Amino acid sequence: MTSQELFDKIKQGRFLISGPCVIENEDMILHLAEKVSKIADKHGWTYIFKASFDKANRTSISSYRGPGMEEGLRILAKVKSEFGLPLCTDIHETYQAEPVGEVVDILQIPAFLCRQTDLLVAAAKTDRIINIKKGQFLSGKDMQYPAQKVIDAGNDKVMLTERGNMMGYGDLVVDVRNLVDMRAFGHPVVMDVTHSTQKPGGLAGKSGGNREYAPYIAKMAASAGVDGFFFEVHENPEEALSDGPNMIQPENLDTLLTDIDRILG
């Protein structure tokens, strides 16, 4: 499937971006890719596998970041070859755009980096789909400018993802108005449900979270008419090496997609 063909499917709605926060090992990645793929197929959703090869913005310097780009891309390529799934992963540096774009279908721009012009332009030049996560410090209306940077660099395959706004200290709140405002730009809009339950830096050097809020955020976003949903999943979230308090188990994802399907009709 070409990038344009995948983007055309994304624009039809009901797509799922899902996987663990970070690549922990190959077996775990292949297991989750297969399991979540079956869940997505059950619901008739387009599924895009997502995992990070490097989490460059962890709270503490001692936190696990991932296997690195070379090993991470090898594992992601294996997901594609074994299961035929399109791939999404994030990049943090301009030099990563080209090699990552040779393997994955969607380059994700992290929320903290969503205004980094050089990173957006480098990603755009790969001609892959670009998923820009809305900064926790921006309104939905402000996201027209990062999107325009990608478009002006010659790539109109842009997606925008909501993941909450900072409210006070160490907490995130989702404002449904941001979803409405971003949809008005005409780009596919994604609700990153699990990251929106995050409490950045809330666990003494790492992020905490409240995954119990995920069903309510998901159903709110479905009511607002978003095109796709982002859920980070893990078989044992309490043992995850990154973002454990936010991630849900695959069986919970199955239940959530059932709830979303009822709302979408």
Image (spheres, grey):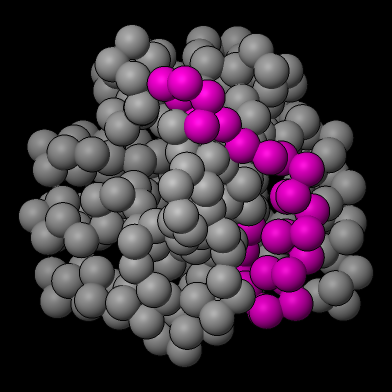
Look at the image and tell me in which quarter the C terminus lies: bottom right
Left or right side of 226 for 62: left
> Would you place residue 231 above or below residue 13 in this image?
above
Residue 35 placement, left or right of 84 = right
Q: Position of residue 261 (x, y in %)?
A: 85, 66
Name which quarter of the figure residue 185 lies in: bottom left
Residue at position x 27%, y 40% in the image:
91
Q: How many marks?
A: 0
Q: As displayed, is residue 75 above or below residue 243?
A: above
Query: Which residue is rendered at x = 28% and y = 16% of the image?
Result: 61
Residue at position x 74%, y 21% from top? 235
Find residue 131 and report its horizontal and vertical position in percent: 39, 58
Name the residue rendered at 28%, 72% in the picture.
147
In the image, which residues are magenta? 202-229
User: Position of 38 compared to 191: left or right?
Assistant: right
* Residue 44 on image: x %, y %: 79, 58
109 in magenta: no
Residue 4 visible in this rendered orientation of the protein: no
Looking at the image, the residue that sits furthest to the front is: 168
